[in-house]
Image (cartoon, grey):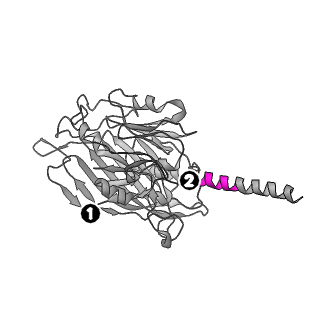
């Protein structure tokens, strides 16, 4: 009887230990697969460079009648002076204030505003603070990504602010937290790292011609997505989602959410495109007494209000980060309440430099 009791007990303990290790190995134990160092200078003399400072966000062959993936016209962002001359939105000298950064390659305008969002349980509207960056670049290479600690792998995390400072970022948001997932396409700064499709996932690709396009991973391999535009191959591919806006229309409805549903309004992070080389990055505070948060459809509406023709949902919640002028502007919160406002480590960032 005693032996018959001990055998299942030992088996149960062993099984429990294995299960615990499996969970830790999958979700918590850092695993470095590759150290990564990107050379961005190699791209600056490519054919994708801007053709003229007087039309700083166009490239050879573009015109106002050109169309691309999402089916909307290229917008000329040059400005006409009173004498009729074209002036650039960029500057040969650096302009940097609390809400603006301009140099010869990048133009960033920062706004913060309070918007009304729906309470999930009560019939009332709540205040939610949104941080928005409107960004122009004159070359795809200025929109970059970086892995935490400059290493590709699983469960490797670092604060967005710390990573951004190390990269010399002018502006940054957190990415798709690829390292917390076992699948989902990962292509960063032109290099493919993970080609395993994530079930039900909708990824988004940013191409070297400045355009963005959303794809369901079940429909295309990562290699197919990368080469969809020939020499203007994919520069970044993120796998979180879903797409919030397509062709200027909301692509999610009230009640649509990511896999983890919260009973509170959430912090959201979105990247969107108005025109090639003209982007919107938005982050909202949530789970706070003075900033409730957003549902996905509300962030979609916000991105549409900013002129986005396509917008994509990146990792939110406590991972949300909005970094500008060498500081974290938003208030990340994992659990409701001011006492829990603290930056969380993430796998990767999106930044401009």
Does residue 110 appear in the picture of this structure?
Answer: no
Q: Which residues are magenta?
A: 16-31
Q: Nearer the viewer, residue 14 or 45?
A: 14
Q: Residue at x 51, y 44 (%)?
A: 242
Q: Position of residue 240 (x, y in %)?
A: 49, 45
Q: Residue furthest top?
A: 230
Q: Residues within 10 Å of mark 2 (few under 14, many from 20)?
A: some
- In this rendering, the answer to whether 229 lies above or below 10 is above
Q: Quadrant of residue 325?
A: bottom left
Q: Quadrant of residue 79?
A: top left
**Mark 2 and mark 1 residues within 8 Å of each other at the beta carbon:** no
Q: Position of residue 280 (x, y in %)?
A: 36, 49
Q: Report the disc number at residue 98.
A: 1
Q: How many marks?
A: 2
Q: Which residue is mark 2?
A: 27
Does residue 264 appear in the picture of this structure?
Answer: yes
Q: Residues within 10 Å of mark 1 (few under 14, many from 20)?
A: few
Q: Residue at x 16, y 49 (%)?
A: 91
| SS assignment at label 2 | helix
Q: Quadrant of residue 326?
A: bottom left
Q: Is residue 23 magenta?
A: yes
Q: Residue at x 17, y 55 (%)?
A: 94
Q: Position of residue 164 (x, y in %)?
A: 33, 56
Separation of marks 2 and 1 at Cα, in angstroms: 38 Å
Q: Residue furthest bottom?
A: 339
């Amino acid at each position: 009887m005693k032996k018959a009791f001990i055998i299942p007990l030992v088996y149960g303990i062993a099984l429990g230990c294995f299960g615990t290790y499996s969970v830790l190995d999958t979700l918590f134990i850092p695993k470095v697969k590759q150290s990564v160092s990107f050379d961005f200078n190699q791209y600056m003399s490519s054919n994708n460079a801007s053709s003229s400072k007087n039309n700083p966000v166009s490239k050879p062959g573009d015109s106002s009648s050109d169309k691309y993936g999402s089916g909307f016209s290229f917008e000329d962002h040059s400005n006409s002076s009173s004498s009729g001359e074209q002036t650039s939105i960029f500057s040969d000298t650096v302009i940097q204030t609390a809400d603006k950064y301009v140099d010869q390659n990048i133009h960033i305008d920062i706004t913060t505003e309070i918007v009304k969002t729906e309470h999930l349980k009560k019939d009332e509207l709540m205040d939610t603070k949104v941080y928005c960056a409107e960004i122009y670049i004159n070359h795809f290479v200025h929109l970059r990504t970086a892995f935490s600690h400059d290493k590709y792998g699983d469960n490797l995390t670092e604060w967005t602010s710390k990573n951004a400072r190390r990269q010399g970022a002018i502006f940054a948001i957190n990415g798709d937290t690829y390292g917390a997932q076992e699948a989902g396409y990962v292509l960063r700064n032109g290099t493919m790292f993970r080609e395993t499709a994530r079930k039900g996932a909708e990824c988004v690709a940013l191409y070297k011609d400045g355009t963005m396009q959303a794809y369901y991973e079940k429909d295309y391999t990562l290699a197919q997505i990368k080469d969809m535009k020939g020499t203007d191959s994919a520069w970044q591919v993120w796998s979180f989602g879903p797409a919030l806006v397509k062709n200027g229309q909301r692509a999610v409805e009230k009640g649509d959410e990511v896999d983890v549903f919260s009973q509170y309004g959430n912090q959201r992070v979105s990247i969107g495109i108005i025109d090639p080389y003209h982007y919107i990055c938005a982050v909202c505070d949530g789970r706070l007494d003075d900033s409730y948060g957003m549902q996905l459809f509300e962030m979609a509406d916000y991105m549409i209000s900013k002129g986005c023709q396509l917008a994509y949902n990146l990792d939110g919640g406590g991972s949300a980060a909005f970094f500008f002028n060498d500081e974290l502007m938003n208030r990340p919160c994992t659990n409701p309440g001011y006492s829990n406002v603290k930056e969380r480590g993430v796998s990767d960032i999106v930044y401009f430099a």
